Amino acid sequence: MSRENTMTKLNITDTTLRDAHQSLAATRMRTEDMLGLAREMEKAGFWSVEAWGGATFDTCIRYLNDDPWDRLRTLREIFVKTPIQMLLRGQNLVGYRHYPDDVVDKFVTAASENGISVFRVFDALNDIRNMQRSMAAVIDTGDHLQGTICYTTSPVHSIKGFISMAEELYALGCSSICIKDMAGLIMPEAARELITGIKAKLDIPVCLHTHSTSGIAPMSYQAAIEAGVDILDTAMSPFAGGTSQPATESIVASLIGTSRDTQIPLSTLRSIKLAACNIRCKYDCLIDPISVRIDSDVLVYQLPGGMISNLVSQLKEQNALDKMDDVLLEIPKVRADLGYPPLVTPTSQIVGTQAVLNVLMGGRYKTVTNEVRDYLKGLYGKSPKPLDDALVTSIIGDIPRITCRPADTLEPIYEKMKADAEAQGLVKKEEDVLTYILYPAIAPAFLKGEKKAEAFPAAPTTTAGIVPADYDIPRSMEVE
Amino acid sequence: MSRENTMTKLNITDTTLRDAHQSLAATRMRTEDMLGLAREMEKAGFWSVEAWGGATFDTCIRYLNDDPWDRLRTLREIFVKTPIQMLLRGQNLVGYRHYPDDVVDKFVTAASENGISVFRVFDALNDIRNMQRSMAAVIDTGDHLQGTICYTTSPVHSIKGFISMAEELYALGCSSICIKDMAGLIMPEAARELITGIKAKLDIPVCLHTHSTSGIAPMSYQAAIEAGVDILDTAMSPFAGGTSQPATESIVASLIGTSRDTQIPLSTLRSIKLAACNIRCKYDCLIDPISVRIDSDVLVYQLPGGMISNLVSQLKEQNALDKMDDVLLEIPKVRADLGYPPLVTPTSQIVGTQAVLNVLMGGRYKTVTNEVRDYLKGLYGKSPKPLDDALVTSIIGDIPRITCRPADTLEPIYEKMKADAEAQGLVKKEEDVLTYILYPAIAPAFLKGEKKAEAFPAAPTTTAGIVPADYDIPRSMEVE
Ligand SMILES: [Co+2]
Ligand SMILES: [Co+2]
C-alpha cells in the first residue's frame, strides 16, 4: 500500500509473561511454567518480551513462593537475543506507594543487573515528577527507557495534552514512547491522531498498549499500524483477547506480505502457541470465562474490565450486589472529585473502593479510605485537574497538603531497612533487601522460606488447544 | 478524518439470531428464547437482522421441534421496522443438495410471504448458475437481493476475479453485494482492495461478512470501514468473537462521533446485550470454550474453525486422533484435487470427510464418499479450477459427467411431493410441503408432532454478564 511504503516493519512486544496472565489469571503464572514457553518465545524475534514488573513481584512473594529475582535471572538465561521488558510504576516501583529515591535507584540498578533491558515507566496520574527519578536511574544503567502516557478520556484529557506529555518525556531522554491504554478505551481515530501527532513532532519510536476488553483493540491496532506505530503489545493466543491483549498471531498474520511485515514466521508462533496452550490448560481454573469475553460494559462505564469484576466481588462480600448500579454511577463522580485520574493501579483501586464506601455508608465521603486521604493531601502527586479546595477541606479537614514532588518528603531508608532485614536474618542476597523494603509485611515469612505456593482452586476444568472438551457439546459442520 | 468525509454512516446487519448461534452453539437457539431479545433488537435501527436460513431450518426440525415457518412469522410480528434477512444457499436453499427450480421458486416465495425482506444468496463454488434461479425468484418478490461472493484464497482466486464476480452479480440485478468470508481469512489489505475495487466499478452497497476465529476480523473491519464498506455483519457481544462475528457494540462504539457513525445508541445496545446475556447463560453448556477463543490454527491451515473441531470429533470416534496432523496435511491436497472450492457448507464437509477417509483407509480415494463422486461428476457445479480429467477418471471411472447448470438435470417435484405429503397427512399449511421436500427423512415425524426438543446436555455451567462465576477465582484489582 502506497501510504505504508515509507514505513518499516512493525515490532512486537509480547506480553504473555506479564500483562496477559496479570489480566486473565490474577498474575498467577509460576516461573516453572514459564520456562518451556520462554524457550520457544526466544526464537520469534520479538522486539521485547514483557515478563517482569507490574503485579508480578507482589504475586510472586504473596501467593506463589516464587522469588521474583530468581525468576528474572532464570528468564535472562533463556532470553539471550530477546530483550526482557518490565513495567515500572515510576516512584511506586512494583508496589502501591511512593518509595524514597535511594530505594528507586537501588531497585532500578538491581533490575538491570539481573536482566531487564527495557524499562517501561509510568505514573498513574501522568505526573512526570513521579517518573523522573526512576527514568534517570534507567538512563544511568544504559538500558532502553520507554516513557509512558497513561491514556484515558475525561474533560481535561486531550490528544494535544498527550502529545505535550510525549514531548516532555522525550526531553527527559526516553528512547521510545508508550501509549498505555489499560482500560481498552482508545478508539481507532484517537489512536491514529495520537500516533500521527507524536511522530510529527518527535523522531522517536511509538508503542501502543491496549486491552481487548471492549473488542475495539484490534481495530485500533489496525489504525495504529496505518499511522506508523513502531511497536504493538500483543499476547500469544491462548492468553489473548478479553481483558488481555490482542493475539500476537493475528497481528503478525495480518501483515504478511505488506510493507509492515513483522518478519516473524507463523510456524515459530505455532510452536510458541502449543507451549502456551499447555500452560493455559493448567491455569484454566484461574480464568473467569467472563474475562475472555468481549465486555461492552467497558464502553458504557469507561472502566477497565478488571475493575468491574472486582467491584462485584467487593459488593458480594458485603451482601450488597443490588447496589452495583449505584456504584457504577458513583465512580465517575468520585473520579471527577479526584481531578480525573486515569484509572490504573493504584488509582483504579482508590477510586473504586471509595465509590463503594460512598454508596454503602449512606453518604458520600462519610468514611474515607487512607488512600483517598493521602491522595487529597497531594501525596500521590498532581491530579490532572486541580482539586477543588472547598471539597478537599470538607473531606479531610484543614490539614497541611503538599504541592512538591511527593518523594521529596521521603527520607532515605535503604541502609536502615537493610540493617533491619539483616538483623532478622532475611538477607541471602542483596536483592532480598529490596524485597523486604517493598513488602515489609509479607517479605519476612517469604524470605525465611516459611511460605508455600498457594494451591490451584478446584474448579470445572476445560481443555485447550484444538482438542475439544470431553463433555457432549453438539457440533455442526455448518460453515457459513 | 478527511478521507471519510464523503462517506455515509455505516450500516449494521446483526447476526445474533442466525450465524452467531450457528457458529458458537451448533445453531441450537430456540424460538422462545429469541423473542425477548428480538424485541430489544427491533429498537436499534439495524440495517437488517440475519435471523433465518443457513442451518437454522435443519436444526429446527431435526433437534428443536421448532417450526421454522412459525419462527419466521413470530419474528416478523416483532421486527416491524427492521428487515429480516436470511442466508439462502442458492439452489441448495436451506439444504445440502440442489433442488429443482419449481421448489426454489416456491421456497423463495414462501420465505418472502412469511417475513424475509433481505435474501443473501450464495453458492459454495461461486458458480453463478447455481444462484440464478433463486436470485430471479427473489427479484420477483420485490425484496432486497444480496448477491454473495464466497471469499477464499487459492492459486485460482484473486481480488480481480472476485471483482469480476461482483460485476456479474450486479448485472443479474442484485441490490447489494456481500463478501462472505466464512473462515475468517480475509486480511485487512485484501478487504480494502476488494471493497475499493468493487466500489470503483459498481454503484452498489457492499457488505463484509467474516468470522473472528483468527482474531483478524476486527482489523479487517477497520480497514473495510476506511475503504467505504456500506454494511458490516456483527453479533451482540454475548454471542460474538471466536468462531462468530465481531461484537456489534465494539463496531458501533468505535465510530461514535466520526463521519461513519452508525447512529445506533450504545444505551439501546446495552438493553439488547442484557437480553442476550440471559440467553447466553442458558446456552453456555452448548458452547465449547475453545470456539470463543482466538484460534491461530486457522491461519496456518486456512480452515474454518468449525471444521477443525469437527474433524477432531470424527477422528475421535474412529479412535484416530493421532492422525490429526495427517488429515490437516491431506485437506489442502483434496481441496486442490477438487479444483479449490471455497470451504463453506457443503464443500467444507465434502473436503473434510474425504480427507479423513484418505488418511484412515490407507490410500487416497480408496473409499470415496457419494458427495465427492457427485462433485466429480459435476453435480455441484463448476469448480473454480477445472478438474483434472485423468484424476477424475481414476477416482470415479469413466462415467458420464455433466457440464450444464446442475439443476437443469432435475425434474420438477413439487406437486408430486405435495401429493405424497398430503397422502401421509403431513400438511397443515402449504409451507409444510416445503419442509417435507427439503428434509424428507426427518420431516414426517416432525410434521406429525412426534418429535420432542432435545434436552440441554448436562455440563459444567458458568455465568454470564457482569456477575462472575461462584467458584473461587482469585481476582486482582491490578489494572495496567
Ligand atoms: Co458466517
Ligand atoms: Co496492560
Image: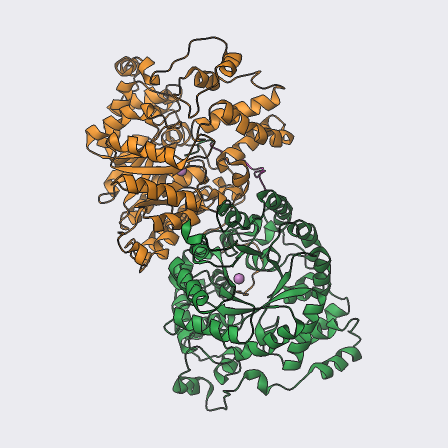
Chain colours: A orange, B green
- Name the residue located 71 percent from the left edge and 66 percent from the top edge: B114
Can the viewer see residue B41 in this picture? yes
Question: Which x, y percent locates residue B79?
Answer: 69, 56
Quadrant of the rendered image holding ligand 2:
top left
Please tell me how many numbered marks the rendered image carries. Answer: 0
Is A449 magenta? The answer is no
Q: In what quadrant of the picture does the N terminus of chain A appear?
A: bottom left
Question: Which x, y percent locates residue B291?
Answer: 51, 54
The image quadrant that residue A198 belongs to is top left
Is B474 magenta? The answer is yes
In this rendering, the answer to whether A20 lies above or below B320 is above
In this rendering, the answer to whether A437 lies above or below B252 is above
Question: Which x, y percent locates residue B119?
Answer: 61, 67
Q: Is residue A239 left or right of residue B252?
A: left
> For the magenta stretch, what is the residue range?
B462-476
Q: Is residue A22 left or right of residue B108?
A: left
Identify which residue, A106 or A130, lies in the foreground: A130
Identify which residue, B8 or B287, lies in the foreground: B8
Identify which residue, B409 or A198, lies in the foreground: A198
Question: Which x, y percent locates residue B128?
Answer: 52, 77
Magenta stretch mostly in which secondary structure? loop
Q: Is residue B228 left or right of residue A107?
A: right
Can the viewer see residue A292 in this picture? no
The image quadrant that residue B390 belongs to is bottom left
The image quadrant that residue B339 belongs to is bottom left
